[in-house]
Amino acid sequence: MKNAHGINVITSKTGRSRAEYQGMPKEMWPMFERNLTPEQADILERVTVFVGGVYPNLSFVSPIHGTEGHLHNYLNFRVWRPLGPDKVEVWCWFMIDKAAPEEYKADAYRGYLGSFGPTGTLEQDDTETWARIVEVSGATMMRDKELNYNNLSNYLMGFSHVKQDESFPGPGTAYPTTYCDALARRMHEHWLDLLTAEASVKEETK
């Protein structure tokens, strides 16, 4: 999207979610249908996970997780605060629609604690990977290597190899695959544009 904002909309292989409206209680469904356009409601009904970012350093994930045999949905906002070239601090917030039943809110929060944040099993696994990527990216062997888009597993990661999804109602540009680095590359392109653009306010000279 414009200004390097982006979102990854993940659906099941069948195109239908195992839990409509991400497992939110049925008493909330009329609210979605009332407040969303038909196109937006259709996406929300079919989606499994939303993962997105707002340039420059706000991200969010809206998954479906199971707690004690039931599926729950919530929203996890994150602000990524750079502390140096190889260190970042992440602030996280748990959010859920205030219209949700209190019992559902409590169950969803337990699901969040077990998956994301410092106590979550998914987050602990992810942060280990993130730290290793940063560690090896500064190594000698990595400095003269380019990303390989030529083998069978990785060629679709380059968005220049994937045609846009013309059926997407918008706004923005969509690609019909989960594994595509269009969002990341667009963010870095926008960042480069800002770094190389002329300053809008000229410095005063004495």
Image (cartoon, rainbow, N blue to C red):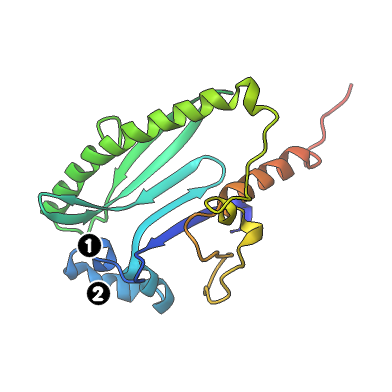
Q: Is residue 175 above or below residue 113?
A: below
Residue 122 horizontal/vertical position (percent) = 30, 38
Where disc 2 sits, the SS reads: helix
Q: Is residue 33 above or below residue 57?
A: below
Where disc 1 sits, the SS reads: loop
Which residue occupies 52% across, 23% down?
Answer: 135
**Label 1 – label 2 distance at C-alpha:** 11 Å
Q: Which residue is mark 2?
A: 30
* Label 2: how many Cα within 10 Å (few below 14, some 14–19, many 20+): few
Find residue 160 and report its image quarter: bottom right
Three-letter amino acid code at the position of disc 1: Met
Which residue occupies 55% across, 68% down?
Answer: 171
Out of 175 and 108, give the one closest to the viewer: 175
Lateral position of residue 195 relative to residue 150, left or right: right
Residue 56 horizontal/vertical position (percent) = 56, 42
Lateral position of residue 180 relative to residue 3, left or right: left
Compare marks 1 and 2 and give the one earlier in the sequence: 1
Find residue 77 and report its image quarter: top left
Number of numbered discs on residues: 2
Please state, as top left, top right, bottom left or bottom right, where the C terminus lies in the image. Answer: top right
Residue lying farthest to the right in this orientation: 206
Residue 127 horizontal/vertical position (percent) = 39, 31
Out of 144 and 186, give the one closest to the viewer: 144
Check whether the beta carbons of the residues at disc 1 and disc 2 lie within 8 A of each other: no
Three-letter amino acid code at the position of disc 2: Pro
Out of 180 and 59, give the one closest to the viewer: 180
Q: Which residue is mark 1?
A: 24
Find residue 92 and report its image quarter: top left
Which residue occupies 14% across, 47% down?
Answer: 106
Q: Which mark is residue 73?
A: none
